[in-house]
Amino acid sequence: MERVTLLLGNHDIHYYDEYLDNSRKDKENYELIHDIFSKNHSLFRLAMSMRIGKKAYLFTHAGIDPKWLEYRMPRVPHNDADAICTSLNDKMKDEAMFFDFVCNGLMDRSASRWGNAKYPSPVWADVEDHECMEERLPGIYQVFGHTLQEFSPVITKQYACLDCRKAFLLTSNGEFVEV
């Protein structure tokens, strides 16, 4: 486990409760899938952070909108990837706390994902949301998936959306290399 981080996404969180119903939930196999997530809850995270040289990287399923962070977790510093990561993962300490956070934060979906939240959560943000964000997490490079790209990843100076049915390595000099 010290070499693997399992990040939860929007297709996972609705299996924590039968009444959460979004994005292709398998209702026929709900009990089985719910049990898998429930029994293995401690294996999952919402975020992972790391440094390569002086650059901080933050990995989530869909990326973090600074305005969502300010709205849902106002005491968390926007320029500290480790603090953001710890604060998000602390919400998973037990299933009851996590379920409350799912209902009061993680289910926030913007119009790009057929929702009405002002700011999208780290499991629902779309690459379109990142393209139009007025603010960024200062000094933090975000890495996420969630928004399937047809052929190639979207790699910018502020973030990388790597969801394109390819695998990538982040090298020791901070470059993404397809494997």
Image (cartoon, grey):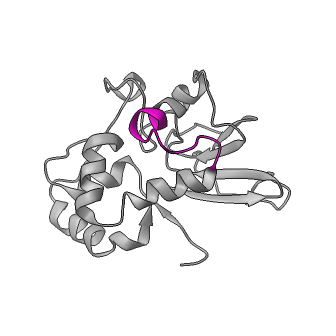
Looking at this rendering, what residue extends furthest in the front direction? 75
**Quadrant housing residue 8:** bottom left
Residue at 45% in and 59% down? 89
**Quadrant housing residue 12:** bottom left
Which quarter of the image is occupied by the C terminus?
bottom right
Looking at this rendering, what residue extends furthest in the bottom direction? 1
Task: Work out whether residue 166 or residue 169 is closer to the camera in this orientation and state it.
Answer: 169
Q: Position of residue 140 (x, y in %)?
A: 68, 44
Q: Position of residue 3 (x, y in %)?
A: 61, 75
Q: Report the side of 142 relative to 29 (left or right).
A: right
Residue at 57% in and 54% down? 83
Residue stretch in magenta = 68-80
The answer to whether residue 73 is magenta is: yes
Residue at 57% in and 29% down? 130
Residue at 63% in and 47% down? 143
Q: Position of residue 171 (x, y in %)?
A: 80, 60
Task: Work out whether residue 107 or residue 94 is closer to the camera in this orientation and state it.
Answer: 94
The answer to whether residue 138 is magenta is: no
The secondary structure making up most of the magenta span is: loop
**Quadrant housing residue 50:** bottom right
Examine the rendered structure and indicate whether residue 136 appears above or below residue 102: above
